[in-house]
Amino acid sequence: MQGARIMRLKSRHTGSGAVARPERLTESGEPVAGMLSPHEQGERAQASMKRGDVEGAIGWWRKAVAQAAATHDREAMGYALLNIAMASTQLGSFGPAEAAFTEAAETGHPDIVPKAFTGLAILYKGLGRIPDARRCYEQVLASGDPKLLPQARQGLAELDRTGE
């Protein structure tokens, strides 16, 4: 059931708020011997971010996604995808951000899915895609994640107050 909801979020849009969809990041391959673990790659990505090298950080997180996908580590893959999405947003790359948030939700990991829908809701609200933002906030509410429920309620209340 959740897969169907995620698939609806994957539609392409044109006009204002249009986003281009890059290739999938989670195509599973074989683990690479001698490759850094997803955690170690994440540490390198964080170091790149501290230096202001957002694109370099995204590169490290992409490697973490590939390694995590190869080893079927949904949690590590999800966190790397969330980081890619947030960094892409910083760069104004909204299509890659949407794709990474969506792929993070598709991991199905219970800690990742509500965070991914929260990120999508904020992104969609900023892009003026209010019905999509509302659906994402509703997904967060349905998750029952106690840390994200207040943010989802506030997001929906803001949409209601502005008549969107």
Image: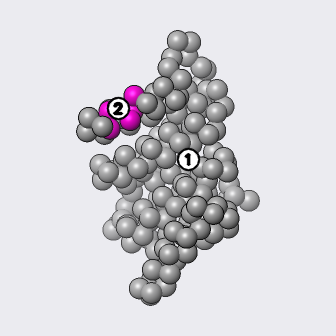
Q: Residue furthest left?
A: 52
Q: Is residue 45 within the magenta segment? A: yes
Q: Can residue 132 be seen from the camera position used here?
A: no
Q: Residues within 10 Å of mark 2 (few under 14, many from 20)?
A: some
Dot 2 lies on which element? helix
Give amino acid for label 1.
Glu
Of marks 1 and 2, the one in the foreground: 2
Q: How is the image coloured?
A: one colour
Q: Earlier in the sequence, mark 1 or mark 2?
A: 2
Residue occupied by mark 1? 103
Report the quarter where the N terminus lies.
bottom right
Residue 158 on the magenta segment? no
> The residue under label 2 is which amino acid type?
Ala
Residue 81, image x and y in percent? Answer: 50, 43
Left or right position of 164 against 37: left
Residue 122 sits in quarter: bottom left
Pointer 1: residues within 10 angstroms few (<14), some, or many (20+)?
many
Q: Position of residue 157 (x, y in %)?
A: 50, 81
> How far across and down, in percent of the image, does residue 106 sit?
62, 48
* Span shown in magenta: 44-49
Rendered residue at 56%/12% (across/down): 33
- The residue closer to the viewer here, 157 or 132, is 157
Q: Which mark is residue 47?
A: 2
